[in-house]
């Protein structure tokens, strides 16, 4: 199990390095994670974060086992259990949305078998946004509209779906507008999750939409299905599946397993 965890972290590190190669790309729709400035621990910086024309003072530093971010006179904790020999830590300044004239500070950390991302935004001495996305790493963003895509695993926003389908990897999207963040309701699965052949543990009804009103088709017990998308809005949860005939539909997610355990993915 430890070897599997180490392989996951290695692949994650490679993804980060590959993304950093694209620094300086000026395209409106970013395929990688181009950033404005990387912040080293213990070093002070000057950068206009809120677009008011005045440069803000910024410093990332450690105190005991805490990793702290200070912007002007405001200090926020990035990680309360920071151990340099256990994980990797990365802090960068981004501009996710060219229309809001303000920048984001993004903190990413990775450990033995888990990782996460924090997005922070400041206006003068006030922290206006401090959002944590567990088990997620920055995949890409669209500069024209502030849509950010995370590569996210089963301990993230959609963690309750593990009760229905085991472990998974998805592309979770959030939109940054000014000092507000808007979580999107659906997330596409990645190729490894999408290619997995799930075997129905019981008779399932697939609907034409997430309203769950009109039946599209039935998946009989023991039949195979592919999961293409996860959807959640409030208490409403569905997975978009493709059956063996190539038809698509939405299956409602509850608290029980939809597929046999042997057919599900178990990475950790």
Image (spheres, rainbow, N blue to C red):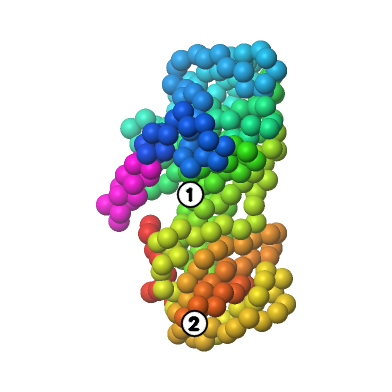
Instruction: Tell me the tag on residue 130.
Output: none
The quadrant holding residue 207 is bottom right
**Quadrant of the snapshot with the C terminus:** bottom left
Question: Of callouts 1 and 2, which one flags the residue occurring earlier in the amino acid sequence?
Answer: 1
The residue pinned by badge 2 equals 245
Q: Is residue 78 above or below residue 138?
A: above
Q: Is residue 39 above or below residue 202?
A: above
- For image coordinates 46% across by 83% down, the residue present is 223
User: Residue reaching furthest left?
Assistant: 3
Whether residue 95 appears in magenta in the rendering, the answer is: no
Q: Is residue 87 visible?
A: no
- For image coordinates 42% across by 46% down, the residue present is 114
Q: Is residue 7 left or right of residue 217?
A: left
The residue pinned by badge 1 equals 151
The residues tagged by marks 1 and 2 sit, at their Cα atoms, a distance apart of 29 Å
Residue 107 position in % (x across, y down): 51, 33
Q: Is residue 224 above or below residue 123?
A: below
User: Residue reaching furthest front?
Assistant: 27
The main secondary structure of the magenta stretch is: helix
Q: Which residues are magenta?
A: 1-15
**Quadrant of the snapshot with the N terminus:** bottom left
Whether residue 7 appears in magenta in the rendering, the answer is: yes
């Amino acid at each position: 199990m430890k070897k599997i965890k180490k392989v996951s972290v290695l692949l994650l590190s490679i993804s980060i390095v590959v993304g950093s190669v694209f620094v300086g790309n000026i395209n409106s729709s970013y395929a990688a994670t181009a950033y404005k400035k990387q912040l080293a621990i213990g070093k002070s910086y000057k950068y206009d974060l809120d677009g008011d024309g005045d440069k803000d003072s910024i410093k990332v530093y450690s105190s005991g086992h805490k990793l702290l971010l200070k912007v002007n006179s405001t200090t926020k904790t990035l990680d309360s259990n920071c151990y340099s020999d256990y994980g990797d830590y990365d802090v960068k300044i981004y501009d996710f949305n060219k229309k809001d004239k303000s920048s984001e500070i993004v903190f990413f950390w990775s450990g033995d078998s888990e990782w996460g991302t924090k997005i922070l935004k400041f206006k003068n001495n006030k922290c206006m946004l401090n959002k944590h996305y567990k088990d997620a790493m920055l995949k890409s963003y669209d500069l024209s509209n502030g849509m950010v895509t995370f590569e996210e695993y089963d301990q993230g926003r959609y963690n309750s779906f593990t009760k229905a389908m085991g472990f998974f990897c998805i592309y979770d999207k959030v939109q940054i507008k000014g000092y507000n963040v808007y979580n999107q309701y659906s997330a596409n699965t990645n190729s490894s999750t999408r290619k997995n052949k799930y075997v129905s543990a019981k008779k399932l009804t697939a609907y034409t939409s997430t309203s769950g009103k009109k039946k599209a088709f039935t998946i009989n017990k023991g039949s195979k299905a592919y999961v293409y998308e996860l959807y959640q809005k409030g208490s409403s949860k569905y997975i978009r599946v493709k059956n063996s005939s190539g038809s698509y539909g939405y299956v409602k997610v509850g608290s029980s397993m939809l597929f046999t355990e042997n057919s599900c993915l178990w990475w950790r």
